[in-house]
Amino acid sequence: MALRQDPEKQVTLDFNPGSDKQTSSHFDNKYPVDQPYDNKYPIDQPYDNKYPVDQPSDYDNKFPVRHHEESGPGDYDPIIAQYSDAQIKRILTCLVALLGYTFLVSFPDNKNFRSIIHFLSVEERQLICARVNQDRSDADLEEFTVKKWLGGAKDWKIWAYGLCFGCATTVSYALAYFLPIILNLGLGYDTGTAQCLIAPPYAFAAIIMVLTGWFGDKYHQRGLCVAFNAILCIIGLAVMGWAYGDTRARYFGAFFATAGANANVPSVLTYQANNIRGQWKRAFCSATLVGGGALGGIVGSTVFRSKDSPTYVPGLSVAMGSQVVILLTVILLTVTFKSNNKKADRGEKILEDLPSFRYTV
């Protein structure tokens, strides 16, 4: 193919390499270079004439956007749906509040004891108050003062209880939020199967809760139960994170992790309840405990990131670290409790302003 150019003629293409005659190809006839481009596509004509924006497109005709005031009686309106959902939640909240007012009973020491369902008789309430007074002598309500309430902040053990509770809820919240995601993206189960597989670990956790509670009540051990649950959780998290290639083993680890984390919630609550005396000190400790649990929930909701799948090593490391903190705190509290109990037995120290009070290890 030979290309010949002439400044006074149009450019032609000769598809006959052996010919000296200048011929115009079919390409030159169809697309001549001497015709201005603007004749076919003039720039002075507005684009809107061909594609006006005020006319609905085919997509708009097929999928019209209906405003709230234009919705018909049978049309789905997301605004109305969201409003209805909010109203249903408000109604359910009111119903639960009414049930609580009906079935919750007053404290046994309350002179105006109210119980619609007749939960406790007068003799049973007197027996409960007698046992509480025998244990720690704080069944009777004390007069509230800010000094008494804030006085609990001076006791470092209260903050240790809050730290343990926060570390326990870190894992329990994390598993509640991300266990379906871990089963789906980390262990390879499909979405429906992952949603079904989250129930068995929590059933196992309920069994562990009952067993540790029974053991603690029978043998008067609280710190040992908390430490056992923390170790169980560490084992489960380690299996979940590092049992590569074995999906069943990793799912088995979810049982231990879920059981240890959730069983420690009531265990830590009873741990602090048995070692606090005074109603207003107990009230301050309850506030710090709830605050620590909320902080643990914040941490637990952020540590398992989707970009860390399928191993989730950062999230699992934080979760395991929180359980190590629980173990160290329980060891420190156990040493302190045993030392103070021995001093109280020798008459060298009065614990919690009560000579007969002893810490529950």
Image: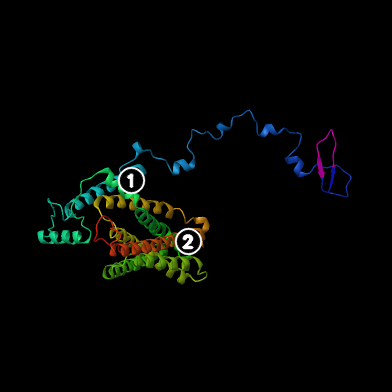
Residue range highlighted in magenta = 4-13
Q: What amino acid is found at the position of numbered circle 1 in the picture?
A: Ala
User: Is residue 208 at least partly visible in the picture?
Assistant: yes
* Residue mark closest to the camera, 2 vs 1: 2
Q: Specify the principal SS of the magenta part.
A: loop
The percent position of residue 301, horizontal first and vertical second, equals: 43, 53
Indicate the secondary structure of the residue bearing disc 2: helix
Q: Which of 23 and 82 is in front in this view?
A: 82
Q: Residue at x 45, y 53 (%)?
A: 302
Asked if residue 7 is among those painted magenta in the image, a careful observer would answer yes
**Residue displayed at 30% across by 48% down:** 151
Image location (x, y in percent) of residue 65? 41, 40
Q: Does the stretch in magenta take in 314?
A: no
Q: Name the residue under label 2.
A: 316
317 left or right of 272 in image: right
> Sequence order check: which comes first, mark 2 or mark 1?
1
Say which mark, if any, is on residue 81. Answer: 1
